[in-house]
């Protein structure tokens, strides 16, 4: 990589992951959990994945203020200045702008990756190769680069990126972004060979992204620009606490990417999953001979198949005659739900809130 000393990474770790309830809770969302049963949280795995790209001192975490101590516990390598604490959840556009202003003040030549904290990457070398390619291109061009995932199936759960001409080796101009399609449209997208999944992993130079905000999302830009002179000082947090909640609640896709003319994509295949639901976790985990994913140390499974079972350490769980179910025991909450209906879990949390308040969320 040509500009390694100007390379930074920002990891977004402020979400709640309500479709992973009751594992993911308001007090400890899924990015802080060992979802894969490997002894490390998704956040820790993401942090370690980026260490070959830049030193730990160049990795920043953007999160909700309430999770600062969790991040310090899981990534003790970070200084306080590397943890950006949002006082409110305003979606990804303000989060990206805040990060860009802060990094530009540290290093006006900064190129940075901004990525979610809760994705799975199985082929890490292939991932790093594509990230490096995108960083080199962003460092030498006025370009907003996104990693696009080669689709393996006509999935209706992802947004899509339509490519046009190849601008540089393995880098394509983006023609348009498409919202989550219906199944028939998704089949057409995949068959055409022109579409990629939108993974929400972006790469750009601080100048390019700040220029884009100034021109395409001036409301966010003007609010946060007032922090110039305060970034990376003891006064930064006070400024953010006061001004950040006044920024619009909008994604960077809507605020910038869908409007910009200088958007490029790097098609990639590196064993990616956004790990959005229990079913996606089930799909990514090793299974026993009956198709079960069993995460727990005392599970007696009799004639069960195609189930995801996640139980607390030291708890004996006996299951019989179960097919295609999610069983998640979190001590104070037990979820037993058909895997085929797991998209309903987000609505279940709303029902729980209505009936029992916030205690179990």
Image: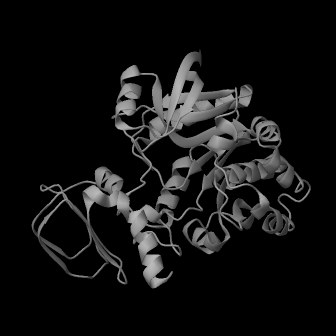
129 relative to 207 in the view: left or right: left
Q: Dividing the picture into quarters, in which one does residue 321 lie?
A: bottom left
Q: Above or below — where is 323 with respect to 250? A: below
Q: What color scheme is it?
A: one colour
147 relative to 61 in the view: left or right: left
Q: Dividing the picture into quarters, in which one does residue 348 lie?
A: bottom left
Q: Residue at x 57, y 72 (%)?
A: 70
Q: Above or below — where is 351 with respect to 285? A: below
Q: Residue at x 53, y 76 (%)?
A: 27
Q: Above or below — where is 352 with respect to 244? A: below
Q: Residue at x 73, y 25 (%)?
A: 141
Residue 318 in sight: yes
Q: Residue 4 versus residue 241: which sits nearer the camera?
A: 241
Residue 1 in sight: no
Q: Quadrant of the N terminus?
A: top right
| Rendered location of residue 275, percent (x, y) | 41, 53
Q: Residue 75 versus residue 161: which sits nearer the camera?
A: 161
Q: How many labels does the image show?
A: 0
| Rendered location of residue 291, percent (x, y) | 17, 55
Q: Dividing the picture into quarters, in which one does residue 319 lie?
A: bottom left
| Rendered location of residue 97, percent (x, y) | 75, 49
297 relative to 227 in the view: left or right: left
Q: Which residue lies furthest to the right in this view?
A: 229
Q: Above or below — where is 339 with respect to 8? A: below
| Rendered location of residue 214, percent (x, y) | 82, 40
């Amino acid at each position: 990589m040509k500009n390694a000393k100007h390379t930074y990474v920002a990891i977004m770790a402020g979400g709640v992951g309500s479709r992973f309830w009751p594992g993911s809770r308001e007090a400890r969302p899924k990015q802080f959990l060992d979802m894969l049963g490997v002894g490390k949280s998704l956040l820790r795995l993401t942090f370690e994945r980026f260490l070959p790209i830049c030193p730990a001192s160049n990795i920043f975490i953007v999160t909700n203020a309430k999770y600062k101590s969790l991040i310090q516990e899981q990534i003790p390598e970070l200084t306080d200045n590397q943890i950006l604490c949002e006082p409110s959840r305003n979606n990804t556009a303000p989060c990206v702008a805040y990060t860009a202003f802060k990094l530009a003040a540290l290093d006006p030549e900064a190129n940075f990756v901004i990525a979610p904290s809760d994705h799975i990457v199985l082929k890490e070398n292939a991932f790093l190769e594509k990230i490096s390619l995108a960083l080199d291109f962003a460092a030498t061009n006025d370009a907003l680069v996104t990693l696009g995932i080669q689709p393996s199936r006509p999935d209706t759960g992802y947004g899509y990126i339509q490519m046009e001409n190849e601008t540089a080796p393995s880098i394509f101009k983006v023609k348009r972004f498409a919202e989550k399609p219906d199944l028939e449209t998704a089949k057409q997208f995949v068959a055409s060979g022109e579409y990629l999944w939108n993974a929400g992993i972006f790469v750009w130079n601080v100048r390019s992204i700040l220029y884009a905000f100034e021109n395409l999302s001036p409301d966010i830009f003007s609010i946060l620009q007032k922090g110039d002179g305060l970034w990376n000082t003891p006064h930064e947090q006070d400024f953010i606490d006061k001004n950040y909640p006044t920024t619009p609640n909008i994604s960077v896709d809507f605020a910038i990417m869908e409007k910009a003319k200088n958007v490029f994509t790097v098609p990639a295949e590196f064993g990616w999953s956004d790990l959005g639901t229990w079913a996606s976790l089930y799909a990514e985990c090793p299974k026993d001979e009956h198709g079960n994913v069993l995460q727990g140390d005392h599970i007696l499974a009799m004639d069960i198949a195609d189930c995801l079972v996640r139980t607390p350490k030291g708890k004996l769980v006996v299951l019989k005659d179960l097919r295609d179910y999610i069983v998640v025991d979190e001590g104070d909450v037990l979820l037993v739900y058909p895997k085929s209906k797991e998209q309903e879990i987000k609505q279940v949390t709303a029902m729980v809130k209505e009936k029992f308040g916030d205690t179990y969320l």
